[in-house]
Each structure stands twice: as structure tokens, then as C-alpha cells.
Image (spheres, grey):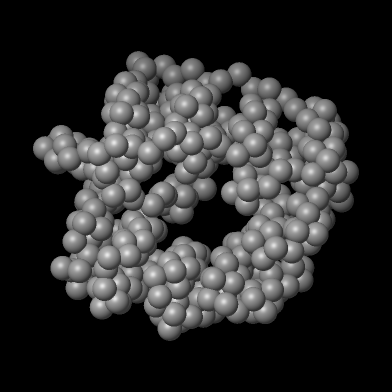
Amino acid sequence: MQVLMWIMGCFLVLGSGCQKPPPEGKIPFALSLACEKAHLINGDDGAKDRVALQLAHQAAESDDYKSVLKVIEGIGEARRGLAYAVAAWDAASHGYKRYASEFIKLSDSDKWIHSDSEKGMQNAFLAGTEMLLEEENRSKNRVSLILDPISKQFAKSLAQALVLVRKPKEITAIGRDFSPDAVDTTVQNLLHVFKNTKRSREENVAIYHLLEQLISTADPQTATSCWSRLAVAAQDCGLKGEAALAAQKSRELALSLNPQTEGYAIGLRDAAFAMLATGDRQEALHCLEVASVKPELVAYYYQPQAMTAIAEGYEKLGEKEKANSWWLKAVKTAKGHHHPRARQINVVLLLSSMGRAGVVPTPEVMEVIEAIGRGEGGDAPLPPGYVKVGDTKTNTVTPPVKQDKKDKNKKESKVPAA
């Protein structure tokens, strides 16, 4: 279930199915650097693969599918099939049918022995991709192969999402069996409809109310992000009153999140984006100021992720000096962690965040990143009751797990959790 929420939180906006795909893109420098640093994450294949899945999806946001392929090739066999399936959906969503077909073939060549839920999730993405490619019979046959009920419901919801996107003005209510885990992608897909300037105000208002129904079924963290994106899209298409309402809902939900988790800062960042889009810069700054009060309440490993969210917010608001100070604070906090793998993961996540923000690391930030790469750090005080074990300056390497196909009890095939 966690992997569902994580992957759906990363989904792309659905393309309009144009005949000729747009030109291939190129990932930002910071994201490219993140991909290079990912190989330094050692000792936990699952953690490394989860980060790589995120990077591959982010590269797809830039339509750089050569980079997507390169990142996925470095993912362990236990999770590579799922990565190819998600990449297939991403490529098809943006109209890159050739890449989508290639990723489907690569995913289908996966020989790892999976649980029903793992294989079901992989087939759900592939079935959705085939629907996008107008291969309806293939898609239905693939859904029929899914044994896990949660994955099957998710697959059916993806299909329903495509109907909503193609005929939004003809639908007035969402089915009761719609999977909550499919909400995020459906919201993003419907937001793409707002970009069609030929639609009337009445049609856009109807789509807005459809989105309201969907978001109301999501968990608070997902809903905060969805309301934020809806506010931006509604403002862009002239629904100013609806946009202000969506921004307010995003802010209220963000403030209700647990301040002892990184999600609090991430939610307030999203709320700040919404407030800025609707013209309330002062409230946007206030959201970031609230998030900035005490990120130290968050568990140490997650503090850099809270800090990078704050940095992204200030960058969006044009407060570059504040943004740079938070980028630097985040990487210095990451360096202090007692475990080398945690330091490396947070370096990659920080660079990923900078890639989203479209910024290049400053020399000061790069200096700390390079120090972490040399194995330096681990000097922050440990919480009471924790004891350092082993050499914190050494990034130990664990050989990859080999799967014995003759004995399923020996497999290591858990889908990475968020």
C-alpha cells in the first residue's frame, strides 16, 4: 500500500494522445548529478532501488527517456520489472508510444519470482499503458491475470481514470469502488483538461467539482498536494474563486499534518505554491515561515527532506538567498547523520529536489556533497539510547542478492515501500 501512495504521488500529467510525440527532453543538471551519485548508496538494495525509482520517474517528467532507461538498468532485478512498467505508463502518458512499447517489452521480460501483489501492481501499470496505446483487448486480458484484489481494483481505477479524462463533462459522479490510491494520478490527468482553453467556464466548473469529489477521498498528505495543484490550474483557466477556495483547503490540510514528520514542511510548501498562484504572496511566505520554525522536530534522517521542501518554496517565491541557506542547511544536516548510507541517500534526494526547482548547486553545497562522497560526516549527536555501531566513515558494500528460482522461500522480492 505504501508503494502505491508513493508512486501515485509521483505521477505525470496525462498527454492528449497527439500523433507526433514532442521532441525528447533533457534532465536538469542537478538531477543528472543525482543519478550519478545514486550508485554510492550501498548496503541496502531496497533503499537504493526506491531512490532510483524516484529518479527514473523524475527523468520521465523531463521526457528524457534515455536517462530513464539508464537509471532503471541500475535497479536490482527484484524491482526492475515494476520500474519498466511505471516508465511505460509515463512514456505513454506523454505520447511517446515507441518508448512505451519498448518499456512494456522490457517489463514483460522480467523473470523474477514475485508475490501476487507485486506482480499485480506491475500488470496494473502495464494494463493502463496498453489502454493509453489503444490496445484495449491486451489491457483487459492483462487485468484478468491480476490475482491480488487491491492491485486489480487499482488497475480498474486507472481504466476509469482514462474515461474521466476523455469525457469529463459527461460524468457527474465518481464510482464507489474507485481506488483511493489512483486519486493522485486521476487528479493530475484531469488537470490537464484545464489547459484546453476552448472549454467553456461551465465545463471547467463541472470538471472542478469532479475533482473535488476525487480529492475528498484521498489521505490528507495527498489531498494537500492535489488541492494545491488544483488551485494553480483553476487560477490559470480563470476560475479565480474556485482557485482561492482550493488554495485555502490546501493550507488548512497542510497545517493539520503532523509537524514531527517531513510531510508537514512538504504540505506547507505545496500550500505556499497555491497561495502564490492565487495572488496571496504574504500568506505563501507565512506558510514557509511556519514550516521553518522547527524542522528539528522531525526524525534526523528526514530533516534534510523537510529543509529541501522549505528551500523549494522560497525558490518559487523568488527568495533566492533564503532558498540557498536552506539548501545548505539541508546538506549540512545530511552530512551529520551517523550512518553513511543515510548521508548518501539524502545527498541524492537533495539533488533531486534541486532538479525539481531548476537550480544548480552552489559551490558551498557542492563542497559538502563532495565531503560526504569522501566518507566524511557522522558527527551529529545521537538521540538518547542510540549507539554507533561500526565505522561511520566507511560506506560498506553488500553484494546483490541472487534469487534461487527453485525455492520461492529464498526470494528477496519485496516491492520498495515509500
Residue 48: percent from left, percent from top: 58, 33
Q: Can you see residue 398?
A: yes
Q: Residue furthest left?
A: 137
Give the answer, above or below, for where 248 lies relative to 17. Answer: below
- Residue at screen point 25% across, 58% down: 165
Residue 410, by quadrant, is top left
**In the picture, residue 35 is in which quadrant?**
top right
User: What is the count of numbered marks?
Assistant: 0
Q: Position of residue 207 (x, y in %)?
A: 28, 70
Residue 269: give x, y in percent of width and height: 61, 65
Residue at 83 percent of width and 40 percent of height: 363
Is 54 left, or right, of 210 in this rendering?
right
Whether residue 110 sits left or right of residue 339 in the image: it is left
Residue 2 lies, with reference to residue 72, above or below; the image says below
Res 413 visible: no
User: Observer-nearest residue: 304 or 204?
Assistant: 204
Question: Where 164 falls versus 351 (above or below)?
Answer: below
Q: Position of residue 78 (x, y in %)?
A: 44, 28
In the rendered image, the vertical position of residue 248 relative to residue 116, given as above or below: below
Task: Please indicate whether residue 265 sits to the left or right of residue 367 in the image.
Answer: left
Q: Residue at x 66, y 69 (%)?
A: 259
Identify the residue shown where x is 20% and y is 69%.
169
